[in-house]
């Protein structure tokens, strides 16, 4: 089989893997040889080959066999010779060629999800700042904040915004080199570079990009050598005025085992929290998704009040919310019934039970600390200044009001304080509520945020 034939076969993979994946991972493959049931391909780097092997080898093998080839195994090799011996390049030339391939031709980041665009992102009060900041970065011009650090719990839209930025930059500024990947992939690539003695190639690749986007950065915490390289990469890009976008599941100051110098660097830009969704945002997401499914399942009727019911009951995260609606439409289509409230309750019984979760003291503490802009560690710790003590008492009051925990249990969560201290804090807030309208408004807002 010739490379020309392989070129025709690989184009058939576009529909299977998607255009972005095809251009990034399939198109660069060069068929080296096929014999003894093995198809071998040349790849730019070891990491590239490992990624294709894990994610696309089965698809490639299937298409080769459809074309008449007998293939038992797919292999990938860096710099395989394809046509007999040839003069070995000088060491300097070989090194330059390797660096050139990594820095000019190949940016094997994580694949982008075509669904995650700005058009499909539903904006509401809990995420409007994060959305606005992401939009600003996606314009491709120099911004006043670097890095942009997005954080929040699972399913609140961090990864969606990261992908949306990358998609928008590709459309607006195709001249920019944009690299998106997870922190785990960054770590894996660095380890591979160490093992293969290609650290300079690694440095050249990551410091040649115009926009670096790293998802779930909390995973490098505690990994000393990876943190060291990430720190130097970060500094090199900032010094060149290159944009960095980072996401994590918590604020930089709350990531355990993260080096202080990295924590400080991450905090020097714009740090934005994607808050848990409120009722209006959840309803907006459901309405958008339902409009899409009405096109897919023509003739299927959804009764009034069902979306409102789901928005009220499923408050965990957007993924669970969207998954519930997907299941509901699929089930109604299969049984040929209208989507009513009764059908929703029967079909989604397990999700609805799981969503009736108990509010934790830790969630209350975190939300109160964010609201009053104080460190969580200070609020739980021994400091007594008024700017810390008042938020602490608010958190104690809300923990007593919104959870079933006993006073001693609440005290343990507040740095091992005695239950009488908790009682005093609760009474103090109850007294102040009657005379301090601002405090009363704060409590009302915090309750609304915590209860979804």
Image: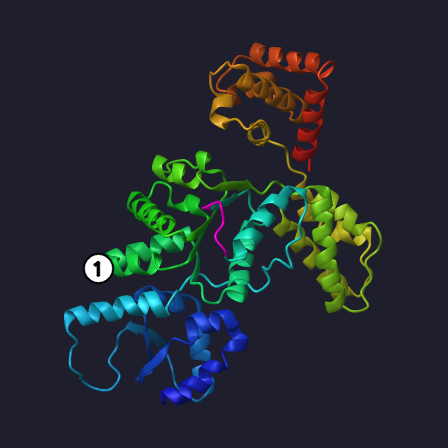
Residue 337, picture quadrant? bottom right
Residue 40, picture quadrant? bottom left
| Element type where label 1 sits in the image | loop
Reply above or below: 39 against 406: below
Residue 15 is situated, as x and y percent measured from the top left of the image, at 55, 76
Residue 366 is situated, as x and y percent measured from the top left of the image, at 55, 31
Reply above or below: 85 against 123: below
| Residue at the right extreme of this rendering | 304
* Residue drawn at the location 69% of the way across and 30% of the way down: 445
Decide whether the magenta segment is chiefly helix, strand or loop. loop
- The quadrant of the image that shows the N terminus is bottom left
Residue 289 shown left or right of residue 395 in the figure: right
* Residue drawn at the location 46% of the way across and 79% of the way down: 62
Q: Which residue is mark 1?
A: 197
Neighbourhood count class around disc 1 (C-alpha, 10 Å): few under 14, some 14–19, many 20 upward: few
Residue 205 shown left or right of residue 63 in the figure: left
Write the start and end of the magenta stretch as one range: 141-147
Whether residue 75 appears in this view of the structure is yes
Residue 141 is situated, as x and y percent measured from the top left of the image, at 50, 56
* Residue drawn at the location 24% of the way across and 60% of the way down: 198
């Amino acid at each position: 089989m010739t490379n020309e034939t392989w070129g025709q076969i690989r184009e058939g993979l576009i529909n299977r893997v998607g255009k972005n994946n095809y251009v990034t991972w399939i198109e660069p493959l060069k068929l080296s040889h096929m014999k003894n049931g093995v198809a071998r391909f040349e790849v730019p780097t070891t990491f590239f080959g490992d990624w294709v092997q894990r994610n696309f080898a089965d698809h490639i093998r299937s298409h080769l066999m459809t074309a008449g080839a007998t293939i038992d195994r797919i292999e990938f090799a860096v710099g395989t010779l394809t046509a007999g011996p040839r003069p070995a390049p000088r060491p300097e030339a070989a090194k330059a060629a390797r660096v050139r391939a990594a820095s000019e031709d190949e940016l094997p980041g994580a694949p982008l999800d075509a669904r995650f665009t700005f058009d499909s992102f539903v904006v509401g009060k809990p995420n409007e700042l994060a959305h606005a900041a992401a939009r600003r970065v996606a314009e491709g011009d120099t911004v006043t904040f670097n890095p942009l650090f997005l954080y929040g719990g699972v399913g609140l839209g961090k990864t969606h915004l990261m992908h949306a930025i990358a998609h928008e930059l590709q459309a607006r500024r195709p001249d920019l080199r944009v690299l998106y990947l997870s922190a785990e992939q960054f770590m894996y690539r660095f380890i591979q570079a160490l093992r293969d003695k290609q650290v300079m190639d690694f440095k050249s690749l990551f410091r040649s990009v115009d926009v670096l986007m790293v998802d779930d950065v909390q995973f490098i915490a505690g990994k000393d050598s990876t943190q060291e390289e990430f720190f130097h990469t970060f500094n090199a890009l900032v010094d060149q005025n290159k944009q960095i976008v980072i996401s994590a599941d918590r604020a930089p100051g709350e990531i355990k085992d993260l080096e202080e110098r990295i924590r400080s660097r991450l905090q020097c830009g714009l740090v934005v929290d994607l808050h848990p969704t409120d009722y209006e945002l959840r309803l907006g997401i459901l309405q958008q998704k339902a409009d899409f499914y009405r096109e897919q399942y023509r003739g299927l009727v959804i009764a009034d009040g069902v979306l409102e019911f789901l928005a009220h009951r499923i408050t965990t995260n957007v993924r669970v919310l969207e998954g519930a609606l997907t299941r509901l439409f699929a089930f109604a289509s299969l049984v040929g019934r209208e989507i009513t409230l009764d059908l929703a309750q029967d079909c989604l019984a397990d999700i609805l039970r799981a969503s009736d979760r108990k509010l934790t003291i830790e969630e209350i503490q975190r939300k109160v600390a964010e609201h009053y802009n104080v460190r969580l560690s200070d609020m739980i710790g021994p400091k007594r200044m008024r700017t810390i003590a008042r938020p602490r008492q608010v958190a104690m009051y809300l923990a007593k009001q919104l959870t079933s925990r006993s006073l001693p249990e609440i005290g343990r969560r507040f740095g091992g304080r005695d239950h009488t201290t908790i009682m005093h804090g609760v009474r103090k807030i109850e007294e102040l509520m009657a005379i301090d309208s601002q405090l009363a408004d704060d409590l009302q807002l915090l309750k609304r945020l915590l209860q979804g």
